[in-house]
Amino acid sequence: MRFSDTMLGTVLLLLGAAIAIYARTLPAVPGQQYGAAAFPTLIGQAMVGCALILFIKGWQAGSVPMIARTEWTRQPGALVAVAVTILCIVAYIFLARPIGFVPISVAILIVLFRVLSVSWPKTVFFAVVATLVTDYVFRSLLLVPLPFGIMPRLPW
Amino acid sequence: MDPIIQAFELVFTWQVLTTITAAALFGLLVGAVPGLTATMATALLVPLTFFMDPISAVGAMVTCAAMAIFAGDIPGALLRMPGTPASAAYTNEAYAMTRKGEAETALGACVLFSAIGGLFGTAVLIFAAPALAEFALNFSSQEYFWMAMLGLTCAAFIGAASPVKGMVSLLIGLLVATVGLKNASGVPRFTFGSTDLMAGIDFIPAMIGLFAVSEVMRTVAAGAPSWDNVQVRIGNIFRDWGGMVVRYWRQQVRGNVIGTAIGILPGAGADVAAYVSYAISRRLSKTPEKYGTGHVEGVIEATSSNNAALSSAWVPALVFGIPGDTITAIVIGVLYVKGLNPGPTLFLFNPQTIYAVFLIFILANLMMVPLGWVVIKLARGLLRTPRAILMPIILVFCIVGAFASNNATYGIIVMLAFGILGFFMEENDIPIAPCILGIVIGPILEHNFITTMIKSDGSLLTFVERPIAAVLAVGLALIWASVLYSSFRNRAAASA
């Protein structure tokens, strides 16, 4: 997904204005000219400035579609693959605690390997091995409290 | 003498040596895989450094980054795909050499001159940093403000294809840095009632998202095609080393000096150094017509330059706490976690740590030759590892790494958000590096600005009243003027 200069400018203009307006709600430090609001205001204003430059560039470039599809999105399955990757991370965020690291990691790896058309035997082998190695390294060597969920503690 | 002996004792323990050897191999592997950058290698290493003692942690990052920058040359020469952006400047040249059947000369030159360049940058670091630190003890908030401004300026404009887009990226970074309670007046900003956001946006998950997750998404979108098989046989890479050193000593020295100078500038790093050096080499060469046809001269100058820049980027990072490039931006975060707050006082109170870091730099660059040889020998097999298997595993690493930074799911959410942001930015040709530097430099800039304003009762003139501050301000004004001038000249040239 590629935004034209005008579209990018519009997004920046709205964002910059929102930031600058939000910054006005920040309390001032009594007796000081510059407080918490100074920097956000400046960032907001600079964004509006960049937006204006982008508008000029967009105007010079003539008519281009506001949002263009980049080359890769035309390949079959490309958008699905990106969506699946994002969903896998979302699934981890919600399911890791109830289910546990090992099952969810194996599941994510199986899904992604299959999306990338890795053969089934390799998929299962690498999903299980990579998960167990990660579990060993992070839980046992580095003492990261990866969630157990429904899984019993592995023998390491 | 005492701190130097202590430094040797700190470094030559089996624990530190094993850690840096492992980090070296990790850096070589990540650097050699196209698409996985040296910055990404460093970012992926961060969650592991939480569990190391300070010297191992810093040593691991130094070694990993140095190896990754060199290893980026390998797929560049063999497949015409730069392993890291710092190799992109001379990828075509090195690949042309491979096609002429000179792969071993190209790779040999890359190993040798990377190591020499790294050692040169280290020498400058060793001699310049303590002297600068002594000087920096005179710095007050005004000078730090200007240093931070200089860093931001270099980050946005040097090496950016479009200054506006560099600026947009920088502003995104600065905006991210304002989130949370950590500002001079302690007011919660952009927290929207979330307790997680009160602490600010955690830098490490953001980094992993911007560099690693976005790359995973890009590769997955392309269906993770495997690389073309490497057909070349790589002979003896040590052939003709003596000849090259004698014949091209000028190029090597020039590359080292320019690389070091660019590295010391806050905000500009190894990739910029390689581009500049390659261009200079071509302009000053006696045989510029040979460039692009597989001529080792430009490769030598640029590869000397990028490794020199990598070492010297540590000068502003250690002395002022202002990152020289994206890698040192990550390192600064780790230094704070490890209680080694960067700044001139680090040289006063912890000289043995600084010397230990210098020692590790020397070791890393010496290790580059034997380990580099091994990886070049393994390169054919390594480049046969299918990306379809690599990328999902990297994603799991990212998730676990982002979680480990605070042992909280919040880290994974931040990582995902920044992964999508990075993906979108890359789609729109908005560079990522300025954003990272904005996140790191933003708080330094704001803190020093507000402190100065409190000291001076709101008078902006105070920023140019102190002599060093005034000199920095003039220097900055000159850089801005030259950027404006060159963009106008380009526009005039384009319309003419």
Image (cartoon, rainbow, N blue to C red):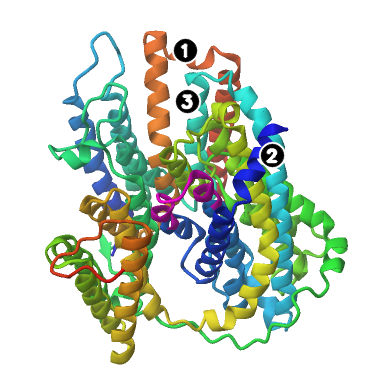
The image quarter containing residue B389 is bottom left
Separation (CA) of disc 2 from disc 1: 47 Å
Give the magenta-colored segment's residue range.
B45-59
Q: Residue at x 12, y 37 (%)?
A: B193
Mark 1 or mark 3, whichever is nearer to me: 3
Q: Where residue B363 sits in the image (x, y, percent)?
A: 67, 54
Tell me the amino acid under the disc marked 3. Phe
Q: Residue at x 33, y 38 (%)?
A: B177
Secondary structure under the numbered disc 1 in the rendered image: helix
The one nearer the camera, B247 or B46, is: B46
Q: Where does label 3 land, which residue? A: B145
Label drawn at residue B461: 1
Q: Where residue A8 sits in the image (x, y, percent)?
A: 29, 51
Whether marks 1 and 3 lie on the same chain: yes
Secondary structure under the numbered disc 3 in the rendered image: helix
The one nearer the camera, A122 or B266, is: A122
Tell me the amino acid under the disc marked 1. Leu
Tell me the amino acid under the disc marked 2. Ile
Q: Where does label 2 land, which residue? A: B5
Which subunit holds the residue at mark 2? B
Q: Can you say whether A130 is above or below B231 in the image?
A: above
